[in-house]
């Protein structure tokens, strides 16, 4: 019997081919557009989060209690190397970097700009966040005695090129104004607004010497880790330090992620509501068109539950077909956007100055497909409840006489 | 034909109600969404213009690209005399910007030190309005400086404290002096408040040897929409190939581009809703038409042409769309207008997004009748497009075939 029901449902689902094709196209186009947009927006935020962690904060960062407010060199972590070694011994820590920073003024012969000099070790930065990936073409990743890597926006402000000289002036540990002449080896683009706009990366040892501090001193220790409890544990272990998680350091990112979740949920809900209305319209008319057919089926002894199953199956066939087509189109679009990205180079200046890449890559999550599947199945099943009610209430004799 | 369309609308209620509701929702949300998006963009741009950047700025060619003292404006008073003659300019002033290191007893920071005419500057920017402590500059204040609140925090000073300055004068000689903190301002633009320092030109010029020189002249206008026209007039009046007259669109190119991208993404998001709604309206139109094949067959048999059938369907969608739009437009427009006058306030948004140039917690809407008109136009076009396939479908039947259709 169920075989017959399935066969009837399948045939009836495509009996009015134009209508069914329209509904299938509607589901497929809206679904593929929706998941492409979700993937693109999530990709933008994830890329910002990923690059910010890799270029700056990691999952957790340690500072002197006063440093984030004062930004003063004197508010540093004096035993940074020792802490770094302790952290590296932990199983739940993937990588650690210590950095030394000082705010000051960068100047060429013609231009000046506010900047932050950051002492780094290229090898540990590479392990920490794949630093070499931030290097723009043409330059080289080399920090010799006078070598400097410049943030991309700072390089634009200073109108500087690879090989140009830049003078950085700041107050050293003794309070004296000190200056260092540096040669640009490369341009770094991290898509972290503040770093791109102000960072000069130099060798950590060179900077420590220039600022007159020990090589054990750091202003920040950043940690890569997958452990959700690391921050709590480090807060207890280092009560004299300011232990901050990524989201505490970048509350904007948290807000952006939340906004994206809300936006995607609203989009999902509205699109599915409209899809539901579309399927319901078609199913309602399709059932009304065949009301006499259902009357005859009831008259010859078919139970209401079997008719209900047939109608549910009809709706499911249409919904699932639309879903499958939408999934294929959506996956194709996501595959393209994930691998080739959306090229917005025409707006590169604007995007980069706001921390975005000029090519935006999407991300693909299984949840895009699973949640959409559930929603479409749900919408398909719900869409036939109203016509089913009509069938349940119908008078079999009268219905078989209806002239459609 | 019109009255027949009206009767059909009343007869086929479910299709009419669905089309009406979906059109209403589309039009209403489109108007409100675009008003919010444009409003927040305008607000960011206007805040930036209010804080410091002028609607038009005059530079010597090369100053922005190459920089250096040889690209300073030379004869400022002559340029200013020409600007006096041009209508539409509300006010203008010259500024001399230089970068240097400011140091208190223990702390130092790089800063942009700007020599300004205090009286003219007060009419141009938010500097005087932003005063939070001490006093604003006067033309005769000597070594007084007026400093951004975040920079004051950074170098740990208070009113009356002395700060040393090291920089370069306009003749590339070494310039150093002791300043006194006389006033503190806060505009809300974080980068600006943490780096800018102002001095009265009368004292600044003696330190920098910058009499009648300037980095640029900044100009504010009575009407920002006339910016291109007035920029052209200024170019014609100056008759100097070594000068360039730049509007805010060039001066804030990055911000303008970022807004354009944001708008593009906004419209892409909206297009998703439109596509779905378009399909649903088309499906309901198609269902409606396909259930009326026999009716159309009869109409064709009694003499109606294919064109008449098209007109009938066009009138139906036109009446439904117009009714929905007539209701949605004033409602959407009212909301846009209301929130343009009483902006939505989201506490803390300016602090969170300070690096993005957001200086206010207010999110005003943009009320612009032309924008509302094209929003409504888009919805009309989409609705008309949605009826094309049903039109094609019904006209593919021959009258006799249609009148026998089951």
Image: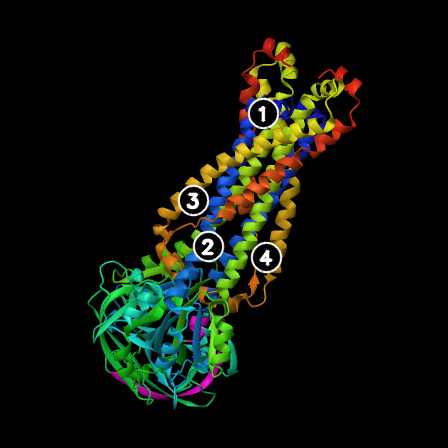
In percent of width and height, residue A38 lies at 49, 48
Q: Which residue is mark 3?
A: A334
Q: Which residue is mark 4?
A: B340
Q: Residue at x 45, y 71 (%)?
A: A60
Circle 3 residues within 10 Å: few <14, some 14–19, many ≥20: many
Cα distance between the residues tagged 2 and 1 = 62 Å
In percent of width and height, residue B69 lies at 25, 73
Circle 1 residues within 10 Å: few <14, some 14–19, many ≥20: some
Q: Residue at x 62, y 27 (%)?
A: B315
Q: Nearer the viewer, mark 1 or mark 3?
A: 1
Is B179 magenta? The answer is yes
- In the image, which disc is placed on residue B225? 2
- In the image, which disc is placed on residue B64? none
Cα distance between the residues tagged 4 and 3 = 38 Å
Q: Nearer the viewer, mark 3 or mark 2?
A: 3
Quarter of the image for residue B238 reads bottom left
- In the image, which disc is placed on residue A10? 1
């Amino acid at each position: 019997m169920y075989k017959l029901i399935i066969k009837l449902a399948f045939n009836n689902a495509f009996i009015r081919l134009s209508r069914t094709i329209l509904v299938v196209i509607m589901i497929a186009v809206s679904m593929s557009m929706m998941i492409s947009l979700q993937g693109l927006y999530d990709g933008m935020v994830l890329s910002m989060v990923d690059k910010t962690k890799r270029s700056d904060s990691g999952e957790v960062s340690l500072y002197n209690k006063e440093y984030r407010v004062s930004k003063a060199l004197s508010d540093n972590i004096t035993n940074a190397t020792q802490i770094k070694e302790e952290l590296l011994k932990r199983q739940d820590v993937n990588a650690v970097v210590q950095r030394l920073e000082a705010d000051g003024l960068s100047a060429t012969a013609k231009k000046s700009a506010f900047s932050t000099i950051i002492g780094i070790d290229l090898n540990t930065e590479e392990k920490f966040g794949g630093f070499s990936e931030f290097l723009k073409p043409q330059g080289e990743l080399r920090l010799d005695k006078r070598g400097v890597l410049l943030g991309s926006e700072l390089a634009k402000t200073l109108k500087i090129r690879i090989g140009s000289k830049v003078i950085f002036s700041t107050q050293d540990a003794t309070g004296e104004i000190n200056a260092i002449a540096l040669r640009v080896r490369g341009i770094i683009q991290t898509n972290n607004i503040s770093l791109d706009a102000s960072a000069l990366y130099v060798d950590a040892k060179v900077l420590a010497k220039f600022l007159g501090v020990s090589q054990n001193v750091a202003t920040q220790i950043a940690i890569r880790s997958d452990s959700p409890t690391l921050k709590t544990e480090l807060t207890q272990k280092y009560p004299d330090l300011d232990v901050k998680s990524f989201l505490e350091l970048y509350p904007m990112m948290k807000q952006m992620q939340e906004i994206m979740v809300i936006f995607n949920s609203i989009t999902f809900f509205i699109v599915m509501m409209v899809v539901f209305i579309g399927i319901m319209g078609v199913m309602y008319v399709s059932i009304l068109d065949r009301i006499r057919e259902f009357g005859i089926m009831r008259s010859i002894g078919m139970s209401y539950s079997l008719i209900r199953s047939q109608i549910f199956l009809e709706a499911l066939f249409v919904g699932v077909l639309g879903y499958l087509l939408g999934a294929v189109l959506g996956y194709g679009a996501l595959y393209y956007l994930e691998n080739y990205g959306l090229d917005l180079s025409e707006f590169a200046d604007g995007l980069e100055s706001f921390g975005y890449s000029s090519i935006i890559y999407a991300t693909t999550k299984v949840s895009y497909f699973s949640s959409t599947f559930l929603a479409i199945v749900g919408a398909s099943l719900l869409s036939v409840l109203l016509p089913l009610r009509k069938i349940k209430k119908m008078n079999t004799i009268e219905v078989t006489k209806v002239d459609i | 034909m019109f009255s027949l369309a009206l009767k059909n609308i009343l007869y086929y209620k479910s299709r009419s109600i669905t089309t009406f509701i979906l059109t209403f929702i589309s039009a209403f949300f489109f108007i409100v969404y675009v008003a919010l998006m444009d409003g927040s963009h305008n607000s960011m741009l206007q805040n930036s213009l209010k804080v410091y950047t002028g609607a038009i700025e005059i530079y010597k060619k090369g100053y922005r690209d190459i920089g250096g003292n040889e690209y300073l404006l030379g004869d400022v008073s002559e340029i200013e005399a020409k600007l006096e003659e041009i209508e539409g300019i509300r006010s203008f002033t010259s500024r001399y910007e230089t970068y240097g290191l400011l140091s208190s007893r223990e702390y130092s920071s790089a800063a942009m030190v700007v020599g300004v005419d205090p009286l003219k500057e007060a009419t141009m920017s938010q500097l005087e309005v932003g005063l939070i402590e001490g006093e604003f500059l006067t033309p005769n204040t000597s070594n007084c400086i007026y400093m951004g609140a975040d920079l004051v925090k950074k170098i740990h000073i208070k009113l009356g404290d002395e700060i040393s300055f090291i920089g370069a004068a306009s003749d590339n000689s070494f310039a150093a002096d002791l300043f006194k903190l006389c006033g503190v301002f806060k505009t809300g633009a974080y980068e600006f408040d943490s780096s800018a320092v102002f001095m009265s030109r009368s004292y600044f010029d003696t330190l920098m040897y910058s009499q009648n020189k300037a980095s640029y002249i900044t100009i504010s206008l009575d009407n920002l929409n006339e910016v291109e026209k007035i920029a052209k007039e200024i170019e014609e009046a100056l008759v100097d190939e070594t000068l360039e007259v730049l509007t805010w669109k060039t001066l804030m190119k990055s911000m303008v581009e970022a807004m354009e991208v944001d708008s593009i993404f906004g419209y892409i998001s909206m297009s998703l809703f439109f596509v779905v709604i378009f399909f649903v309206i088309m499906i309901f139109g198609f269902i409606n038409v396909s259930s009326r094949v026999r009716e159309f067959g009869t109409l064709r048999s009694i003499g109606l042409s294919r064109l008449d059938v098209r007109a009938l369907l066009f009138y139906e969608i036109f009446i439904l769309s117009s009714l929905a739009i007539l209701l949605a437009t004033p409602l959407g427009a009212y909301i846009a207008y209301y929130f343009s006058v009483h902006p939505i306030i989201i506490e803390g948004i300016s602090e969170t997004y300070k690096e993005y140039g957001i200086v206010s917690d207010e999110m005003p809407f943009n009320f612009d009748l032309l924008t509302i008109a094209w929003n409504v136009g888009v919805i009309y076009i989409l609705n008309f497009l949605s009826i094309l396939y049903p039109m094609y479908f019904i006209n593919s039947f021959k009258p006799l075939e249609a009148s026998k259709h089951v």
